[in-house]
């Protein structure tokens, strides 16, 4: 097996796929498969079987939970996706022989839990577990990308416009430097309703898009604008962008999300470089969750979930030995308001169990970004105190 060194970003979309490996010498992402004919290293998202037409719609179908028919048999969605990952990830071997993946970050437009669980299941079939794979949204990729650029590019707010398939979205990153750590927040606005394109040609489309963008950034102090999406590849965009970049920097490209995923892979796989910043978006938990324990000769808070954790990836577990306790106290501290709440989970005494003769497993996961599920399980304490198989479960609203 090759040495695990590759920090890989992977952008998985319905119609296209991109990959980028972090170049430690240049300190920036390097596209996998870039050529003169394919400068953006874009691959069609399709399952290609020998002697058969490529299956181009497999990703939307498996995202809905549908099975895929291959050679007259229905195949499990996770198996189909694992096959696609195996084929595409194999491209890294050509340029990086003898090296394997140290950290993989997959970024997707749609980050519903059912979909991310499917991606993790597919990667697990390739022996890429959650210890070296993370799934994030395009929004989160944008945050990682923006904060990995030179600081003069984000001294003020940063804007991103995505124009794809007739849909226009605007994302604005703002920093709250008065907080510790510094909060990097993201605001999203869907501007698609403002578009009512007629059949009068590209000139009209460019004017309309420019007016919508100018209205969105009016009175905003922006250091830089990023433009991504196939919709911005039309002839009118050059003149429009010239006017939009007055007083600010502007960049256009189709590699932002895969590059952001690559920077995230560097952040997860090696020493964190954004430790002074807390990246927040609508999928991230806004509170720190902890329980009070006694360890190392003192009472201390054991953090189960950090603020800024993506809710569908939060799944923490710890074993504790109660000392006559009849309830478990979960501390919830909001990162924005600093308000602390205490949620008490009653532990019905287990017959025959006394202080320090019981070991409890405490697990914390989330049903959604605001709803936490705490599960406590009696694991017993050696042969003299076997497990009672008792389970206590509580749902906690942390908002």
Image: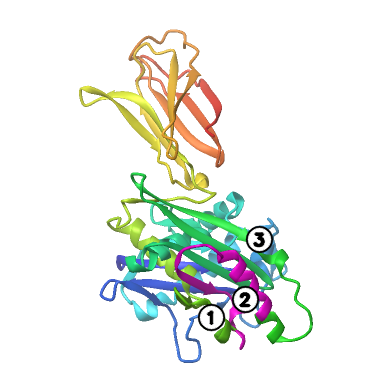
Rendered position, 60 above or below 113: below
Q: Residue furthest left?
A: 297
Residue at 59% of width from left, 70% of height from top?
Answer: 214
- Residue 273: image quadrant is bottom left
Q: Position of residue 82 (x, y in %)?
A: 54, 63
**Label 2 – label 1 distance at C-alpha:** 9 Å
Instruction: Give the foreground label among 3 and 1.
Output: 1
Q: Which residue is mark 2?
A: 210
Q: Earlier in the sequence, mark 3 or mark 2?
A: 3
Q: Quadrant of the N terminus?
A: bottom left
Q: Which residue is mark 3?
A: 62
* In front of the other: 194 or 144: 194
* In front of the other: 22 or 359: 22
**Please, what secondary structure does the residue beneath circle 3 have?**
helix
Q: Residue furthest front?
A: 219
**Label 3 – label 1 distance at C-alpha:** 43 Å
- Magenta extent: 207-236
Q: Which residue is mark 1?
A: 243
Q: Quick check: marks 2 and 1 in contact, CB under 8 Å?
A: yes
**Please, what secondary structure does the residue beneath circle 2 have?**
helix
Residue at 36% of width from left, 56% of height from top?
Answer: 268
**Please, what secondary structure does the residue beneath circle 1 have?**
helix
């Amino acid at each position: 097996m090759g040495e695990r060194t590759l920090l890989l970003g992977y952008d998985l979309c319905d119609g296209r796929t991109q990959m980028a490996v972090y170049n430690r010498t240049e300190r920036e992402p390097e596209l996998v498969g870039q050529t003169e004919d394919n400068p953006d290293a874009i691959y069609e998202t399709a399952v290609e079987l020998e002697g058969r037409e490529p299956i181009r719609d497999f990703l939307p179908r498996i995202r809905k939970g549908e099975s895929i028919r291959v050679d007259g048999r229905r195949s499990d969605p996770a198996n189909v996706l694992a096959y696609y990952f195996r084929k595409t990830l194999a491209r890294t071997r050509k340029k990086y022989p003898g090296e394997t993946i140290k950290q993989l970050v997959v970024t997707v437009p749609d980050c519903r839990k059912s979909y991310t669980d499917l991606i993790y299941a597919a990667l697990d079939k390739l022996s890429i577990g959650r210890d070296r794979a993370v799934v994030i949204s395009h929004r989160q990729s944008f945050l990682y990308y923006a904060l990995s650029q030179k600081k003069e590019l984000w001294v003020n707010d940063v804007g991103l416009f995505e124009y794809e398939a007739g849909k226009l979205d605007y994302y604005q990153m703002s920093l709250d430097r008065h907080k510790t750590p510094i909060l990097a927040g993201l605001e999203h606005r869907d501007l698609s309703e403002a578009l009512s394109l007629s059949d009068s040609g590209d000139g009209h489309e460019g004017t309309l898009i420019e007016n919508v963008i100018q209205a969105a950034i009016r009175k905003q102090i922006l250091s830089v604008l990023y433009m991504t999406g196939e919709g911005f590849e039309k002839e009118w965009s050059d003149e429009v962008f010239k006017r939009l970049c007055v007083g600010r920097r502007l960049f256009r490209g189709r590699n932002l999300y895969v590059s952001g995923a690559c920077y995230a892979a560097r952040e997860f796989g090696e020493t964190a470089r954004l430790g002074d910043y807390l990246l927040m978006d609508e999928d991230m938990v806004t509170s720190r969750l902890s329980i009070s324990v006694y360890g190392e000769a003192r009472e201390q808070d054991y953090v189960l979930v950090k603020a800024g954790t993506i809710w569908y990836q939060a799944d923490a577990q710890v074993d504790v030995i109660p000392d006559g306790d009849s309830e478990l106290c979960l501390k919830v501290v909001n990162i924005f308001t600093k308000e602390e709440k205490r949620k008490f989970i009653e532990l019905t005494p287990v017959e025959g169990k006394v202080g320090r003769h019981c070991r409890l497993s405490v697990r914390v996961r989330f049903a959604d970004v605001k709803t936490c599920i705490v599960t406590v399980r009696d694991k017993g304490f050696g042969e003299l105190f076997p497990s009672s198989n008792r389970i206590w479960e509580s749902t906690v609203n942390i908002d």
